[in-house]
Amino acid sequence: MRLWIRRTVNAVSLVILIGVFAVAGLFAAAELGVIDTTSDPVVTGPENTSQIPNVSASEHPEIDGEALEIAVFERVNEKRTATGVHTFSHSEQVRLISRLHSKDMAERDYFDHIAPDGEGPEERHARYDGCDRPNENLAVLNVNPDDDIESLTYRAVEIWSESEGHNKSMLTSYDHVSGVGVHVTAEGRAYITQNFCREHPSA
C-alpha cells in the first residue's frame, strides 16, 4: 500500500513539474516574441504621413534610394518566407520615419539607434504618431563603383543575417508591420534603417 502511495505521489509531482516548465516556457516565448501575446494585430490602415517630412532617399547620382528601400524590404520578406515566418505588411508612415533617421545619421555623422540629442526609435515614432514600441535594424555601407541596388540589398540583409540580434529582429514572429528608410549621400555612404512594429501606426 505504501509503495502504491509513493508511486502516485511521484507521478503527481512529475506532472506538476512538467506543467511548471511548460508555463515558464510559454512566458519566455512570449517575452522573446516567439509567440504572439495577443491575436490578430491590425496590419493595415490609413497612412498619416502629412506631418512627416518627405526627405530625399538619395543624393547619389547612380543609386535610387527609394528603389533600395523597396528592395531591402522585399529581400527581408523573402528571408522570412524561407524560414516559415509571416511576411511584413508595408507602412509608408514607418518607411518615412525610418528614412528620417537614416538622413539624420548621414547629416550628423553618427551610426546609432540613439541620436546625439538622445532621441531613440520610440521618441521618433511618438513625434509623428508612429508605432508603439518599435524595433530597429541599422546598416551603413560604402557604395563601391560597381554596386547597384541588388548588390547593396544583398550586403545589407546579409549583415543583419550574420548578427544574432539583428537576425532575431528581422525574423521575429511578434512584429507584423515594417518599413525601410534609406539615405545615400553624394559621397557614397548608404544609411539603411528598418523599423519593425507589432501593429500598423493607425491601430
Image: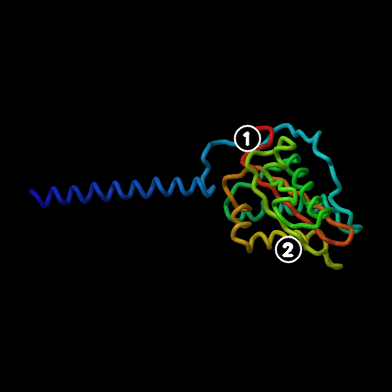
Q: How is the image coloured?
A: rainbow
Q: Which mark is residue 155?
A: 2
Please report the residue visible at 75 percent of the width from the left and 43 percent of the height from the top. 97
User: Residue 152's image quarter?
Assistant: bottom right
Residue 200: % across, % down: 67, 37
Q: Is residue 44 left or right of residue 50?
A: left
Tell me the quarter of the image containing the C terminus. Answer: top right
Q: Earlier in the sequence, mark 2 or mark 1?
A: 1
Front position in the image: 129 or 196: 129
Q: Is residue 37 left or right of residue 9?
A: right
Circle 1: residue type: Val
Residue 56: % across, % down: 86, 48
Q: Is residue 97 above or below residue 116?
A: above
Query: Which residue in the rendered view is the most extreme toward the right?
Result: 61
Please report the residue visible at 80 percent of the width from the left and 64 percent of the height from the top. 142
Q: Which mark is residue 42?
A: 1
Query: Which residue in the rendered view is the most extreme toward the front?
Result: 117
Circle 2: residue type: Arg
Query: Which residue in the rendered view is the most extreme toward the left?
Result: 1
